[in-house]
Image (cartoon, rainbow, N blue to C red):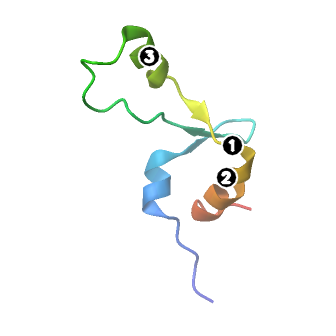
Amino acid sequence: MPKVKTNCAAKKRFKLTASGKIKRKHAFHSHILTKKETKRKKNLVKFGVVEKANQQAIKELLVMK
């Protein structure tokens, strides 16, 4: 039986916390920042947590049990 490979795209985009939650970055913070308010840009820098509905799918991409 061959080894199961980790999805490289998921590996770059998600990190695990010590408690087992999955961290993710917010969208809309890479370009066209001039029209966005400072408060909005500042909040987009912070990490978000993946919703429970998507956690199982991401864990499969990261080859976790």
Check disc 3 and report its element: helix, strand or loop.
helix
- Pick whichever, 46 or 6, lies toward us: 46
Numbered label attached to residue 51: 1
Residue at 49%, 54% in the rendered image:
11
Whole-angstrom CA distance, mark 1 to mark 3, is 21 Å
Indicate left or right for 39 with 2 as reference: left
- Pick whichever, 46 or 8, lies toward us: 46
The residue where tag 3 is placed is 40
The residue where tag 2 is placed is 54
At label 1, counting other C-alpha atoms closer than 10 Å, the crowd grade (few under 14, some 14-19, many 20 or more) is few
Q: Quadrant of residue 28?
A: top left
- Vertical position of residue 46 compared to residue 8: above or below: above
Residue at 58%, 75% in the rendered image:
4
Residue at 44%, 16% in the rendered image:
40
**Labels 1 & 2 near each other (Cβ < 8 A):** yes
Indicate left or right for 64 with 44 as reference: right
Residue at 74%, 46% in the rendered image:
52
| Residue 41, percent from left and from top | 39, 18
Eye-nearest disc, 3 or 2: 3
